[in-house]
Amino acid sequence: MSSEQEVSRMFIRYVQQALKNERINRHKVNLRRIKETPLEEWLIEEIEDPHHLDELKLTDEEIEHLEDFIENERLATAVASLSLPDKMVLYQYYYDELNDVEIGSRSGKTSQGVNYRRQRALNRIRAAYTNM
């Protein structure tokens, strides 16, 4: 295995971990909110709105500024250079844990198109990251 492949794998793992950490942080904030709410009110909210997990997802405006959620400055700068569709695909793949077919069905693209966009976005991040 070449060192470039190892670096690429390490980089992808880093991005995945950063997005998972953000999900965990949002979940912890949500748990604090739940602990502060009396149990009866919390149960009523759950029954009325079972889609409470939507609160943990980023909005389109937040995805547009995905770099704001990345602590590593070099990586954040590299991600900032991506287009919104590239960021959307990366977010859906690594954060929402959707596969290429699911992303494609949501966006009206083929799974091959989604895979190509994701790979191209990762290559752009890698290139921008190494050129800093």
Image (cartoon, grey):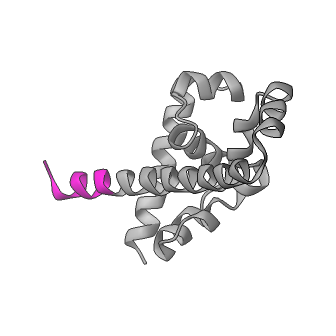
**Whole-percent x, y for residue 4 in the image:** 23, 57
Q: Looking at the image, which is closer to me, 130 or 48?
A: 48
Q: Residue at x 53, y 27 (%)?
A: 100
| Residue 6, magenta (yes or no) | yes
x and y percentages locating residue 103 in the rendered image:
61, 29
Residue 57 appearing in the image: no
Residue 13: image location, x then y, percent: 36, 51
Q: Is residue 5 magenta?
A: yes
Left or right of 108: which side holds 98?
Answer: left
Provide residue 90's location: percent of width, then percent of height: 55, 45
**Residue 3 occupies quadrant:** bottom left
At 64% from the left edge and 59% from the top edge, which residue is drawn? 66
Q: Which residues are magenta?
A: 1-10
7 above or below 41? below
The answer, for residue 83, to whether it is visible in the render is: yes
x 81%, y 25%: residue: 47
Residue plotted at (84% across, 31% down): 44
User: What is the quadrant of the C terminus in the image?
Assistant: bottom left
46 vs 77, left or right, is right
Q: Looking at the image, how many numbered discs can be counted on the residues?
A: 0
Please tell me which residue lies in front, 96 or 120.
96
Left or right side of 13 for 27: right
The relative height of residue 132 versus residue 118 in the rendered view (above or below) is: below
- What main secondary structure does the magenta stretch of the protein show? helix
Measured along the vertical axis of the image, is residue 74 above or below residue 92?
Answer: below
